[in-house]
Image (cartoon, grey):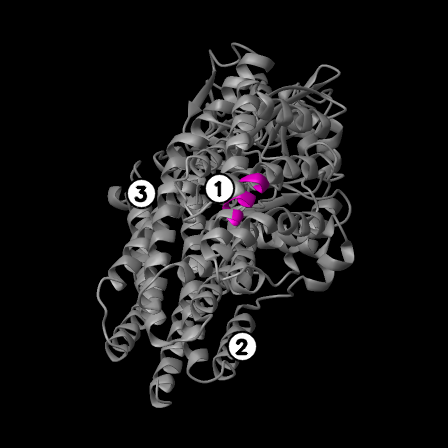
Amino acid sequence: MGTQIIFLRKFLTLFYGNELSAGITLSFWLLITALGASAGKRFFSPAQPEREILKIIFAFAVFLPVTFIAADFFGSAGGAATGKILSPFFMIPAVFFLLFPCCFLAGALFPLFCASRTGEKHVSAGIVYALDAAGTAFGGIAASFLLVRFFSPLQSAWLISGLIFFLLGIKVFSCGGKSSIYKFSKIMFAVFATAYMMDVPSSIEDFFLKKRYAAHNVIISADSIYGNITLIERQGQLSFIKDGSYDFSFPGGNEDCYAAYVPLLQAPNAAKALFIGGGPGAARWAQRFPLKEIIYAQQDTKLMELYERWASSGVFGGRLRLAEGDPRELVKKSASEYDCVVVNGSLPLNARDNRFYTVEFFARAKIALKEGGILSLSAESASDYLSPSQAAALSSVYKSLSAVFKNVLAIPGEKTLFLASDGDIDMNYEKLLQNAGMEDDAVAGVIVLNTRSSRLKWMKDAISSSAVGENRDLRPLAYYYGFFGWLETFGHLFGKTFLPNGDITGTVFLFALVFITAVAVLSGRKTGAVLFATAATGFSALFFQILMMIVFQIIYGQLYYRIGLISTFFMAGMASGSFAGSRKNISCGKAFSALLKVQAIYIFFPLLFVFYIPRLFEGTDFFTGSSGLFFMLIPFIYAFPAGLRFSLSARLEGGKNFSGRLYAADFAGSALGAALGAAVLIPVLGIYKSCLLAAALNLIALMRLFSYNQEGG
């Protein structure tokens, strides 16, 4: 788990910090581990499992730092322009290639550990699974509270490998005889320790970071609880890169001026304005207006520390004030306070950004605005052409604003600017600029051009023709269609071919049910029923983990920091459940009866979560307090029956390779749950229908288990 957390954070930085990156990484991690478990006894000799285990552990320790070095190489060789997101057609094979050595070896260990135990095979498989999960949970705690706080990814991998070599060298893992592995481990430990003291891991990371931004001067790269921040400089302009993607620059261009002028010209008598996202540039331009108070809200305090240190010290003071903390929470606690709220962001590609583009946020912003106040919203697009995915994403945002405000206008440009208000919106910007004495400013001509009636009509026609629905917290359609827009930037045909047209929730739901039923029917007799139920539970468990990550991101906006803790508590629940199922040598009949009950629990768990979702967003301290206690307890509770189920399933079937097959089925189902949950189910179906689908999956698995019993299991 320690390695998994470090990998996740590394790939969130390399391939943009969204849930899709996390889903792909987890999916490949689990799928390759399943392949390793399935092939473990074929590629490695089960006659001497202890010696094979030593070889695999040694190889894992060698490959681990090499994988992180290779990841940095891929990041610098990806071919993307500075601050641009790497192509998914590069990301997907790169992640698979990078994860394969370590994950395959880790998976191969499971059947070999089972073979190394004496006694009853079925019990041993459950115990090994429990020890695996317990070690994973312990590694997650170490990574979350130590490694990710004080060490870089490569430094963390270096320390883990060094520790493994040290333990091998002192024969903590013994094969009961002589082995050259012990001698080589001592040599490798000496090499790794010496290299670490010479700061070799940091030097390697610095080399590839400079190579990735070769045309710029890299000033600093630092981690905060919200992600990685890299500050680069070229010809006097500083650029802030967040999780590998461009965030903002200093000094900013006309786009910051444009983002401030368009909404504030609508409110010449405004006294207080709130700016969210996009750097402080737009808020600084707002000082040209007679506002009494200008607030720039920024959740990432580390980002502002770097801004004030390297870009503009003393920028905050007087009328311009920095509000640290979650901007969404700030809006939630305000009532009739602001004349203008400006969200200076871009089209959302993750749940963290999407939380400022939903019906729920717009409703809170309306309460925070004074009567007749105006909300301004930026979203990336194109000046004269909208691709189908861009039109769909912008349409979803437009419909969401229209569900809350009486008047909504979309202004085309390099960024589409939405204006929403319950009061009148005056589009005679020539007059507004003259009244403000700003008709000669650099952006005046652009504002007048973009707000011509013909341009406004073109934009309205382009986005109103789409059949997509509203963008909501629990159904992030703008984020989903924004993802297709991302695909179009790397190949128009791909994005256009696979772009859904209209509301496809019913189609996706029906297709998923038919597919699941077909797999259940064709899964074979007896053993197939157990494996299908195992895969179904694994699917549900990882789908739920992805679901918790997304909900956590919506509420807190800091998945980068807490992803390790959520995963750790999940694995702690798996370990506890597996230990509980391995305690006694019960009969197959009793094990089967208990297995049916566990499968039934997984029918009701998703339905119960649907019931509790509204309470998550009501702000009850237990659910959404600063400690996030709910998000630690629920993964543990949800994973406990999954660990119990594995131990029970291991008792039902014999066979030389069944423990490995069971482990592989568990991880294969988990891989599908991670991939489909992040990329398709939650964005398309929404959280409620996705939970219903998970319940239906486990109902089919329960019915398949009943047929197993009738077949003489």
Q: Which residue is mark 2?
A: 515
The mark closer to the camera, 3 or 2, is: 2
Q: Nearer the viewer, residue 643 or 18?
A: 643
Kind of residue indicated by mark 1: Thr
Kind of residue indicated by mark 3: Thr
Which residue is found at the position 45% from the left and 25% from the top? 150
Q: Are marks 2 and 1 in contact (CB under 8 Å)?
A: no
Which residue is found at the position 28% from the left and 43% from the top? 629
Q: Nearer the viewer, residue 316 or 530?
A: 530
* Crowd band around label 1 with a 10 angstrom C-alpha radius: few (<14), some (14–19), many (20+): some
Q: Which residues are magenta?
A: 55-63
Relative placement, left or right, of 615 versus 258 is left
Q: CA distance from mark 2 to mark 1?
A: 34 Å
Q: Secondary structure at mark 1?
A: helix
For marks 2 and 1 on the same chain, the one whose residue lies earlier in the sequence: 1
Which residue is found at the position 41% from the left and 73% from the top? 533
Q: Which residue is mark 1?
A: 3
Q: Which residue is mark 3?
A: 624
